[in-house]
Amino acid sequence: MYVALLLASPTTPKLDDTTVVALRNAWGGGEITWLAEGIAAEFPIETIPDNRWTVWEDLQALQIDLVVVPSEGRRKKMLLADMDSTMIQQECIDELADVAGVGSRVKEITAKAMNGELDFEGALTERVGLLAGLPETVIREVIDTRITLMPGGPELLATMKRDGAYCALVSGGFTAFTRHIAATLGFDENRANTLLVENGKLTGKPGLPILGREAKVQAFHEISERLGLSADQVMAVGDGANDLGMLTIAGAGVALHAKPSVAAQCDIRINHGDLTALLYVQGYSLADFA
């Protein structure tokens, strides 16, 4: 058995009975359950319809996300999350570069790397090189004035942790930022790259080895094995090409506002909702949120 879930953005709760009932009837589904009025509704189905992605495309035009997941084992025991453009709304290195006056060049490299057009490790090294000489104090300035949480993140972490899930932040960004975000949201651990500093200034070099796509997969296996969890018990979320490894092996791999080339390789694609969508995917209703 499966569950078909329709999701709208919490800021524009436009999901209505007409849309949900029409799809339920077309797919021969069971009783409709509203998880949040105007935002999330679901119904059971016996098999995944052949026209799943055609319907998905049609609903995208209405700014509605469609997710189909197995009805068993929906609630996960672990969350493995990317940070930049996932748990926060910015790319930290882009913000540092903007302060350094090389923002446009770095943003161009970041976009290509996240879309899988450039090697992640090489792209990171090149971008960090452009930050050489920047005062270390700029990191705190960027955190305080430029970094904002992705909507729904606090609810996601609080609810999953309340119910016993382990939450890990695994980023291709930098520990100076992941430590702050992990502490703010309540992640149990965080892993990221390091920015090398000498005499109070960035050297323009990242610490080695660089944490990229394979390191995220390694973190997935190390943490899940340590906790005695199977891949099916893990939810992973990210938006870039370097997240694909962990997204494709997780029981629930969520492409959140992801690059098209990334989303195309994931079954759970959230383009209009925020991070609370990850709770609805697990079967939580709005009333269940911590």
Image (cartoon, grey):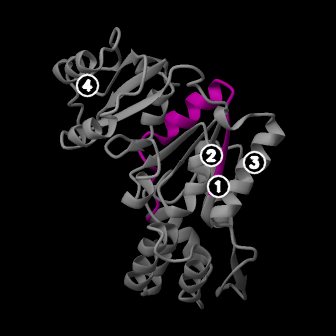
Is residue 155 rendered magenta in the image? Answer: yes
Image x and y of residue 101, in percent: 42, 87
Identify residue type, mark 3.
His
Q: Is residue 18 left or right of residue 245?
A: left
Q: Is residue 230 left or right of residue 204?
A: right
Identify residue type, mark 4.
Gly
Q: Is residue 114 left or right of residue 202?
A: left
Q: Residue 65 or 154: which is nearer the viewer?
A: 65
**Precedes in sequence: disc 4 or disc 3:** 4
Q: Are marks 4 and 3 in contact (CB under 8 Å)?
A: no
Residue under label 3: 221
Q: Nearer the viewer, mark 1 or mark 3?
A: 3
Residue under label 4: 38
Q: Residue at x 56, y 76 (%)?
A: 119
Residue under label 1: 170
Marks 1 and 3 sit apart, C-alpha to C-alpha, by 12 Å
- Label 1 neighbourhood size at 10 Å, few (<14), some (14-19), many (20+)? many
Read off the magenta span. Answer: 146-170
Identify residue type, mark 1.
Val
Q: Are marks 3 and 2 in contact (CB under 8 Å)?
A: no
**Precedes in sequence: disc 4 or disc 2:** 4
Residue under label 2: 249
